[in-house]
Amino acid sequence: MDSWLSSLKDLLDIRNSAKLSLPGAICATLLVIIFWPPKPIDVIPVVQASSKDNNLQIGLPAEASAPPAGESWQSPLDGFIRRVLVPKTPNPACTIDEYYLKPVTGITGLLFKKYSDDAQRRQHALEEQSGNLERCLAAEKRLQGVEKAADEALQRDLTILEGSMAKQVVLLTAYEKADSPLTYLTRKRWEQSEKAIAERRSLIAQHEQEARDREWEIAELTRWKGIVSDRLAEPGRLRPELGFDDYLSALSKHVLAFIFLAVAVGMVLEGISTPGILGLLDSILFGA
Protein backbone atom coordinates (compact mmCIF):
# COMPACT_ATOMS: atom_id res chain seq x y z
CA MET A 1 0.00 0.00 0.00
CA ASP A 2 2.83 2.38 0.79
CA SER A 3 4.37 1.81 -2.66
CA TRP A 4 1.02 2.63 -4.28
CA LEU A 5 0.71 5.87 -2.35
CA SER A 6 4.29 6.81 -3.25
CA SER A 7 3.67 6.11 -6.94
CA LEU A 8 0.45 8.14 -6.84
CA LYS A 9 2.28 11.06 -5.22
CA ASP A 10 4.97 10.92 -7.92
CA LEU A 11 2.30 10.88 -10.60
CA LEU A 12 0.54 13.91 -9.11
CA ASP A 13 3.86 15.76 -8.89
CA ILE A 14 4.43 15.12 -12.58
CA ARG A 15 0.94 16.35 -13.39
CA ASN A 16 1.64 19.63 -11.58
CA SER A 17 5.01 20.23 -13.19
CA ALA A 18 4.60 18.74 -16.66
CA LYS A 19 1.83 17.60 -18.94
CA LEU A 20 1.26 14.37 -20.82
CA SER A 21 0.79 14.98 -24.54
CA LEU A 22 -0.43 12.71 -27.30
CA PRO A 23 2.74 13.15 -29.45
CA GLY A 24 4.86 12.33 -26.40
CA ALA A 25 2.85 9.17 -25.71
CA ILE A 26 3.08 8.08 -29.36
CA CYS A 27 6.84 8.68 -29.53
CA ALA A 28 7.34 6.92 -26.20
CA THR A 29 5.43 3.92 -27.55
CA LEU A 30 7.64 3.86 -30.64
CA LEU A 31 10.78 4.05 -28.50
CA VAL A 32 9.57 1.17 -26.34
CA ILE A 33 8.91 -0.94 -29.45
CA ILE A 34 12.27 -0.09 -31.03
CA PHE A 35 14.36 -0.71 -27.92
CA TRP A 36 12.36 -3.65 -26.57
CA PRO A 37 14.98 -6.24 -25.53
CA PRO A 38 14.93 -9.48 -27.52
CA LYS A 39 13.86 -12.60 -25.71
CA PRO A 40 16.57 -15.21 -25.12
CA ILE A 41 16.33 -18.63 -26.69
CA ASP A 42 14.26 -20.74 -24.31
CA VAL A 43 16.07 -23.99 -23.58
CA ILE A 44 15.88 -26.26 -20.55
CA PRO A 45 17.85 -29.34 -19.44
CA VAL A 46 15.91 -32.59 -19.56
CA VAL A 47 17.15 -35.40 -17.30
CA GLN A 48 16.95 -38.99 -18.43
CA ALA A 49 17.97 -42.02 -16.40
CA SER A 50 18.61 -45.60 -17.46
CA SER A 51 16.14 -48.32 -16.54
CA LYS A 52 18.61 -49.58 -13.91
CA ASP A 53 18.10 -46.43 -11.83
CA ASN A 54 14.47 -47.00 -10.90
CA ASN A 55 15.24 -45.86 -7.35
CA LEU A 56 15.76 -42.32 -8.68
CA GLN A 57 12.13 -42.05 -9.81
CA ILE A 58 13.11 -39.78 -12.68
CA GLY A 59 10.02 -38.63 -14.51
CA LEU A 60 9.87 -39.11 -18.25
CA PRO A 61 10.50 -36.00 -20.33
CA ALA A 62 7.31 -34.07 -20.90
CA GLU A 63 7.55 -34.91 -24.60
CA ALA A 64 7.19 -38.62 -23.86
CA SER A 65 4.70 -38.37 -20.99
CA ALA A 66 1.32 -39.96 -21.51
CA PRO A 67 -1.63 -37.52 -21.53
CA PRO A 68 -4.34 -37.79 -18.88
CA ALA A 69 -7.37 -39.86 -19.81
CA GLY A 70 -9.68 -38.00 -22.15
CA GLU A 71 -7.25 -35.12 -22.72
CA SER A 72 -4.89 -34.23 -25.54
CA TRP A 73 -1.34 -33.52 -24.42
CA GLN A 74 0.70 -30.79 -26.04
CA SER A 75 4.32 -31.00 -25.01
CA PRO A 76 6.06 -27.78 -23.91
CA LEU A 77 9.22 -29.08 -25.58
CA ASP A 78 9.91 -28.00 -29.12
CA GLY A 79 12.80 -30.22 -30.14
CA PHE A 80 16.10 -31.78 -29.10
CA ILE A 81 19.25 -29.61 -29.27
CA ARG A 82 22.17 -31.64 -27.96
CA ARG A 83 23.38 -33.90 -25.17
CA VAL A 84 25.25 -31.82 -22.60
CA LEU A 85 26.05 -34.32 -19.84
CA VAL A 86 27.06 -37.95 -20.17
CA PRO A 87 27.92 -39.47 -16.78
CA LYS A 88 31.35 -40.99 -16.39
CA THR A 89 30.29 -43.24 -13.52
CA PRO A 90 27.86 -46.11 -14.17
CA ASN A 91 25.55 -45.29 -11.26
CA PRO A 92 23.45 -43.16 -11.30
CA ALA A 93 23.23 -42.89 -15.08
CA CYS A 94 21.67 -39.43 -15.26
CA THR A 95 22.18 -37.97 -18.71
CA ILE A 96 21.10 -34.41 -19.54
CA ASP A 97 19.82 -33.26 -22.91
CA GLU A 98 18.95 -29.71 -23.92
CA TYR A 99 15.52 -29.09 -25.43
CA TYR A 100 13.88 -26.00 -26.88
CA LEU A 101 10.81 -24.71 -25.08
CA LYS A 102 7.80 -23.91 -27.22
CA PRO A 103 7.04 -20.18 -27.16
CA VAL A 104 4.00 -19.05 -25.22
CA THR A 105 1.06 -18.01 -27.38
CA GLY A 106 1.13 -14.34 -28.34
CA ILE A 107 -1.51 -11.62 -28.13
CA THR A 108 -4.22 -13.70 -29.78
CA GLY A 109 -3.74 -16.38 -27.16
CA LEU A 110 -4.34 -13.88 -24.36
CA LEU A 111 -8.00 -13.75 -25.36
CA PHE A 112 -8.37 -17.48 -24.90
CA LYS A 113 -7.33 -20.15 -22.42
CA LYS A 114 -4.41 -21.28 -24.60
CA TYR A 115 -2.01 -18.72 -23.10
CA SER A 116 -2.49 -19.93 -19.53
CA ASP A 117 -2.29 -23.57 -20.66
CA ASP A 118 1.05 -22.95 -22.42
CA ALA A 119 2.45 -21.08 -19.41
CA GLN A 120 1.35 -23.85 -17.04
CA ARG A 121 2.96 -26.53 -19.19
CA ARG A 122 6.24 -24.59 -19.30
CA GLN A 123 6.11 -24.13 -15.53
CA HIS A 124 5.45 -27.84 -15.03
CA ALA A 125 8.36 -28.80 -17.30
CA LEU A 126 10.76 -26.58 -15.33
CA GLU A 127 9.57 -27.89 -11.96
CA GLU A 128 9.76 -31.46 -13.23
CA GLN A 129 13.38 -31.09 -14.32
CA SER A 130 14.28 -29.24 -11.12
CA GLY A 131 13.05 -32.23 -9.13
CA ASN A 132 14.88 -34.68 -11.41
CA LEU A 133 18.16 -32.80 -11.02
CA GLU A 134 17.68 -32.72 -7.25
CA ARG A 135 17.21 -36.51 -7.21
CA CYS A 136 20.34 -37.04 -9.32
CA LEU A 137 22.36 -34.79 -7.01
CA ALA A 138 21.10 -36.62 -3.91
CA ALA A 139 22.01 -39.98 -5.44
CA GLU A 140 25.47 -38.74 -6.44
CA LYS A 141 26.18 -37.40 -2.95
CA ARG A 142 24.90 -40.59 -1.32
CA LEU A 143 27.18 -42.72 -3.49
CA GLN A 144 30.02 -40.30 -2.83
CA GLY A 145 29.83 -41.15 0.87
CA VAL A 146 29.76 -44.89 0.19
CA GLU A 147 32.77 -44.66 -2.09
CA LYS A 148 34.69 -42.58 0.44
CA ALA A 149 34.14 -45.23 3.11
CA ALA A 150 35.27 -47.98 0.71
CA ASP A 151 38.39 -46.00 -0.22
CA GLU A 152 39.28 -45.50 3.43
CA ALA A 153 38.93 -49.27 3.99
CA LEU A 154 41.27 -49.94 1.05
CA GLN A 155 43.79 -47.48 2.47
CA ARG A 156 43.73 -49.33 5.80
CA ASP A 157 44.21 -52.66 4.04
CA LEU A 158 47.15 -51.20 2.10
CA THR A 159 48.77 -49.96 5.30
CA ILE A 160 48.43 -53.41 6.88
CA LEU A 161 49.82 -55.15 3.79
CA GLU A 162 52.78 -52.76 3.59
CA GLY A 163 53.56 -53.33 7.28
CA SER A 164 53.33 -57.10 6.83
CA MET A 165 55.61 -57.01 3.78
CA ALA A 166 58.18 -54.92 5.65
CA LYS A 167 58.34 -57.59 8.35
CA GLN A 168 58.68 -60.30 5.71
CA VAL A 169 61.60 -58.44 4.11
CA VAL A 170 63.40 -58.31 7.44
CA LEU A 171 62.67 -61.98 8.04
CA LEU A 172 63.74 -62.95 4.51
CA THR A 173 67.04 -61.09 4.90
CA ALA A 174 67.73 -62.92 8.14
CA TYR A 175 66.89 -66.33 6.63
CA GLU A 176 69.12 -65.66 3.59
CA LYS A 177 72.05 -64.81 5.84
CA ALA A 178 71.51 -67.96 7.87
CA ASP A 179 70.90 -70.06 4.73
CA SER A 180 67.65 -71.27 6.32
CA PRO A 181 65.39 -73.80 4.57
CA LEU A 182 62.49 -71.37 5.24
CA THR A 183 63.96 -68.87 2.79
CA TYR A 184 61.95 -70.22 -0.17
CA LEU A 185 58.62 -70.17 1.71
CA THR A 186 59.27 -66.68 3.06
CA ARG A 187 60.19 -65.43 -0.40
CA LYS A 188 56.89 -66.80 -1.82
CA ARG A 189 54.94 -65.01 0.90
CA TRP A 190 56.83 -61.81 0.20
CA GLU A 191 56.02 -62.07 -3.52
CA GLN A 192 52.34 -62.67 -2.73
CA SER A 193 52.28 -59.65 -0.45
CA GLU A 194 53.94 -57.53 -3.13
CA LYS A 195 51.33 -58.62 -5.67
CA ALA A 196 48.48 -57.91 -3.24
CA ILE A 197 49.89 -54.43 -2.56
CA ALA A 198 50.12 -53.69 -6.30
CA GLU A 199 46.49 -54.78 -6.73
CA ARG A 200 45.38 -52.61 -3.81
CA ARG A 201 47.24 -49.59 -5.18
CA SER A 202 45.69 -50.08 -8.62
CA LEU A 203 42.23 -50.39 -7.04
CA ILE A 204 42.79 -47.26 -4.95
CA ALA A 205 43.90 -45.32 -8.05
CA GLN A 206 40.76 -46.48 -9.85
CA HIS A 207 38.57 -45.40 -6.91
CA GLU A 208 40.28 -42.01 -6.76
CA GLN A 209 39.59 -41.46 -10.46
CA GLU A 210 35.95 -42.44 -9.95
CA ALA A 211 35.77 -39.98 -7.05
CA ARG A 212 37.10 -37.21 -9.29
CA ASP A 213 34.59 -38.17 -11.99
CA ARG A 214 31.77 -38.05 -9.44
CA GLU A 215 32.89 -34.63 -8.21
CA TRP A 216 32.77 -33.43 -11.82
CA GLU A 217 29.27 -34.86 -12.26
CA ILE A 218 28.09 -33.20 -9.04
CA ALA A 219 29.51 -29.87 -10.22
CA GLU A 220 27.78 -30.19 -13.61
CA LEU A 221 24.45 -31.22 -12.06
CA THR A 222 24.70 -28.33 -9.61
CA ARG A 223 25.34 -25.93 -12.48
CA TRP A 224 22.31 -27.16 -14.43
CA LYS A 225 20.21 -27.10 -11.26
CA GLY A 226 21.20 -23.45 -10.83
CA ILE A 227 20.10 -22.68 -14.40
CA VAL A 228 16.67 -24.22 -13.77
CA SER A 229 16.38 -22.42 -10.41
CA ASP A 230 17.14 -19.11 -12.14
CA ARG A 231 14.45 -19.82 -14.71
CA LEU A 232 11.95 -20.59 -11.95
CA ALA A 233 12.82 -17.27 -10.29
CA GLU A 234 12.01 -15.19 -13.37
CA PRO A 235 9.31 -12.51 -13.09
CA GLY A 236 7.02 -14.50 -15.37
CA ARG A 237 6.91 -17.53 -13.10
CA LEU A 238 3.60 -19.00 -11.97
CA ARG A 239 4.84 -20.20 -8.58
CA PRO A 240 5.04 -18.77 -6.04
CA GLU A 241 1.80 -17.25 -7.26
CA LEU A 242 1.64 -13.46 -7.00
CA GLY A 243 -1.09 -12.00 -4.85
CA PHE A 244 -3.52 -9.44 -6.25
CA ASP A 245 -1.86 -6.54 -4.40
CA ASP A 246 1.61 -7.57 -5.61
CA TYR A 247 0.34 -7.86 -9.17
CA LEU A 248 -1.23 -4.39 -9.12
CA SER A 249 1.89 -2.93 -7.51
CA ALA A 250 4.13 -4.33 -10.26
CA LEU A 251 1.67 -3.17 -12.94
CA SER A 252 1.52 0.36 -11.51
CA LYS A 253 5.32 0.62 -11.64
CA HIS A 254 5.28 -0.22 -15.35
CA VAL A 255 2.53 2.32 -16.02
CA LEU A 256 4.36 4.99 -14.05
CA ALA A 257 7.62 4.33 -15.93
CA PHE A 258 5.82 4.68 -19.26
CA ILE A 259 4.24 7.96 -18.14
CA PHE A 260 7.66 9.29 -17.13
CA LEU A 261 9.02 8.40 -20.57
CA ALA A 262 6.03 9.94 -22.38
CA VAL A 263 6.31 13.20 -20.39
CA ALA A 264 10.05 13.45 -21.04
CA VAL A 265 9.65 12.89 -24.78
CA GLY A 266 6.73 15.33 -24.85
CA MET A 267 8.84 18.02 -23.21
CA VAL A 268 11.56 17.52 -25.81
CA LEU A 269 9.04 17.70 -28.67
CA GLU A 270 7.42 20.79 -27.22
CA GLY A 271 10.79 22.48 -26.91
CA ILE A 272 11.68 21.69 -30.51
CA SER A 273 8.32 22.87 -31.85
CA THR A 274 8.39 26.14 -29.89
CA PRO A 275 8.63 29.18 -32.24
CA GLY A 276 12.17 30.53 -32.45
CA ILE A 277 13.88 27.29 -31.46
CA LEU A 278 14.17 26.04 -35.03
CA GLY A 279 15.59 29.40 -36.20
CA LEU A 280 18.10 29.38 -33.35
CA LEU A 281 19.24 25.86 -34.25
CA ASP A 282 19.54 26.86 -37.91
CA SER A 283 21.70 29.87 -37.02
CA ILE A 284 23.91 27.77 -34.76
CA LEU A 285 24.37 24.92 -37.23
CA PHE A 286 24.50 26.78 -40.53
CA GLY A 287 25.34 30.35 -39.45
CA ALA A 288 22.28 31.76 -41.16
Image (cartoon, grey):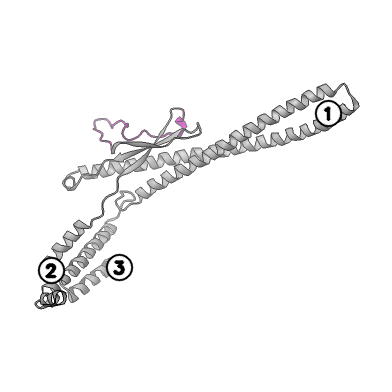
Q: Quadrant of the C terminus?
A: bottom left
Instruction: Find disc 3 in the rendering and name its residue.
Output: 2
Magenta stretch: includes residue 34 = no
Amino acid tagged 2: Ser
Q: Which residue sits at x=73%, y=25%?
A: 192
Q: Which residue sits at x=25%, y=35%?
A: 74
Q: Quadrant of the N terminus?
A: bottom left
Q: Which residue sits at x=26%, y=34%?
A: 73
Crowding at label 1, few (<14), some or many (≥20) Cα neighbours within 10 Å? Answer: many
Task: Reply above or below: 238 against 186.
Answer: below
Q: Which residues are magenta?
A: 52-76
Tag 2, which secondary structure? loop
Rounded to the nearest angstrom, the CA distance separating label 2 from label 3 is: 28 Å
Q: Where does residue 164 sit, x and y in percent of width and height?
A: 77, 32
Foreground disc of the pair 2, 3: 2
Left or right side of 185 for 158: left
**Quadrant assignment, res 200:** top right
Tag 1, which secondary structure? helix
The mark nearer the N terminus, 2 or 1, is: 2
Q: Nearer the viewer, residue 160 or 190?
A: 190
Amino acid tagged 3: Asp
Task: Reply above or below: 249 against 79.
Answer: below
Amino acid tagged 1: Leu
Q: Label for residue 172?
A: 1
Q: Where does residue 69 sit, x and y in percent of width and height?
A: 27, 30
